[in-house]
Amino acid sequence: MTIVKHELRQGKISFLVWTLAIAFLLAVCVVLFPEMKGEMDGVTKIFSSMGSFTAAFGMDRLNFGTLIGYYAIECGNVLGLGGAFYAALTGAGMLSKEQRDRTAEFLFTHPVKRVRIITEKLLAILIQITAMNLIIYITALVSIRMVGETIPWTEFNLLHLAYYLLQLELAGICFGISAFMKRGSAGAGMGLAALTYFLALIANIAKPASFLKYITPFSYCSGADIVSDRSLNTGLVAVGMALGAAGILAAYLNYSRKDL
Amino acid sequence: MEAIKTAGLTKYYGKARGIQGVNLSVEQGEYFGFIGPNGAGKSTTIRLLTGLITPTSGSAQVLGRDVVRQKEEVLSDIGYLPSEAVFYSGMKVRDVLKLSADLRKKDCSAEAQRLCERLELDPSRKVDELSFGNRKKVAIVCAFQSSPSLLILDEPTSGLDPLMQRAFFELIREQNDRGTTVFLSSHILSEIQHNCTRAAVIREGEIIACDRVEVLGQSNAKRVAVRGTVNLDGLEGIRDLKREEQGVSFLYSGGMNLLLHRLSAGDILDLSVSDPDLEEIFLHFYEKGGEG
């Protein structure tokens, strides 16, 4: 586990910055809820008259006046985008940084199997993403308790699970990208995260583009679907996990034989 | 069993030549030099031996193990000093050394401390703050601390001051005296001449000579330096002619009587005829079609 420990140390600052930033923003959103609760009836009416914009964010089916409706939209965006960017960045840099920073010659001339190095790096990503989600989950719980709201456990847990799976999928795909690129993988990862976010918005707005929901992980994170169905769309999750696994498989196949 | 044995080792990067048909045999305990100009294929050979790249064809064995199929076993026997010492940003020297030892699953702390003291390297400093030479020292400690059976050193002295170079070569000599095989890649001929027992010369990806250093240094040519005036026009066997302020200097491999005849007809103030040094001979190896 030497490489896992090494990667966790190397990624410590990035982990802390992203985790604290997302947790802080999420807590602020929750703490603001009681103040905004009274005004939400009006807000819901305004949003409901905004046409496709409302549909894009699923606000046509969520009630802003309830904690879970508010949480699914506001906090979902913070955790969704923030988590996606962090997962994409971490995955995209994990293998490519060795060549980009010219440390590959150091690491890969030690007697450790390449497959083991790839596995430990993957494990480091998993640990970081899991730890980040646990911290954010606990922060959200504490914040909701602090404002005296009841926690709608099923919807709350499903929302967090969906975003956790989204991050794993993106990290897996970006890990695959990382195996093929020397430079620019961070940009590619961030671009992919942003692209999938906007693809989900487009899929929500335009019926002809609804097929896009199968290629963006944000589709199974739709707060409106999760709150109304009280379950995750397993079909979309399965497609997402398959895409993430394909990224990881590509990383193993390419990087274990790659000339460094 | 040879420490290093390659047979027809070839590497192409796409269509670009890396090395071609390299046959090397380095005995255990040898202090072997590997010399060639930049781009000749030295680093490619080393990267193949350390498993960073895979051969296009041919094979390479280190201490009887195949570098492709038994890469991890091979690497556990090798201490590798890369030409450019790059480490993870933000780490302290002692953390880098510990990481290297942990990756080898060895406790090298005592040897690491001894080497740091010997090379005057402060383990509490961050690697980002170190000069190029000091980063090289970190790489030296990483390569030596596990007491490997084979040391592969790629351009090891770049960035080290002369005193540190001497300390470094003493360190290698001690390791070699203890039975460690040394494979020293360099384009600095004096390093090979003063330290190695055998050497191979690589040019344009192919081994063009491999022998004991003394044998490689033998040549029919003489370095002739003349102070005064002499007419050398039409005299065959002259190479590397340098016109100096008060005379000329050249490598001569033609008939000695012909040269003496020309010299006697000239106005000579001083004359010296000596064996050329290894550097001069290798310069001719480097030139396409050149002979020593």
Image: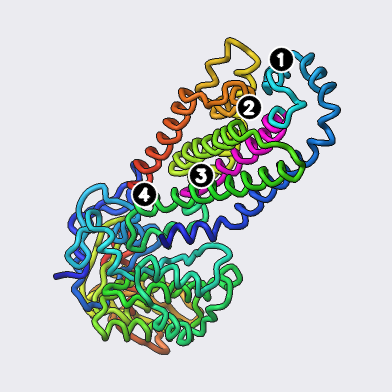
If you read the primary sequence from the N terminus, does the residue marked by circle 4 or circle 1 appear first?
1
If you read the primary sequence from the N terminus, does the residue marked by circle 3 or circle 1 appear first?
1
Q: CA distance from mark 4 to mark 2?
A: 44 Å
| Stretch in magenta | A70-96
> Residue B23, labelled with which disc?
none
Q: CA distance from mark 4 to mark 1?
A: 49 Å
Q: Which residue is mark 1?
A: A52
Q: Amino acid at mark 3?
A: Gly
Q: Which residue is mark 4?
A: A259
Q: Are marks 4 and 1 in contact (CB under 8 Å)?
A: no
Q: CA distance from mark 3 to mark 1?
A: 33 Å
Mark 4 vs mark 1, foreground winner is 1
Q: CA distance from mark 1 to mark 2?
A: 16 Å
Q: Which residue is mark 2?
A: A223
Chain that bears disc 1: A
* Residue under disc 4 on the same chain as residue under disc 2: yes
Q: Is residue B215 left or right of residue A37?
A: left
Residue B1's spot in the image, x, y percent?
Answer: 14, 70
Q: Amino acid at mark 1?
A: Ser
The quarter of the picture where residue B59 lies is bottom left
**Magenta segment: does it hold B67?**
no
Chain that bears disc 2: A
Would you say residue A188 is visible in this rendering? no
Q: Residue furthest bottom?
A: B270
* Helix, strand or loop under label 2: helix
**Which sits in the foreground, A4 or B124?**
A4
Q: Which residue is mark 3?
A: A91
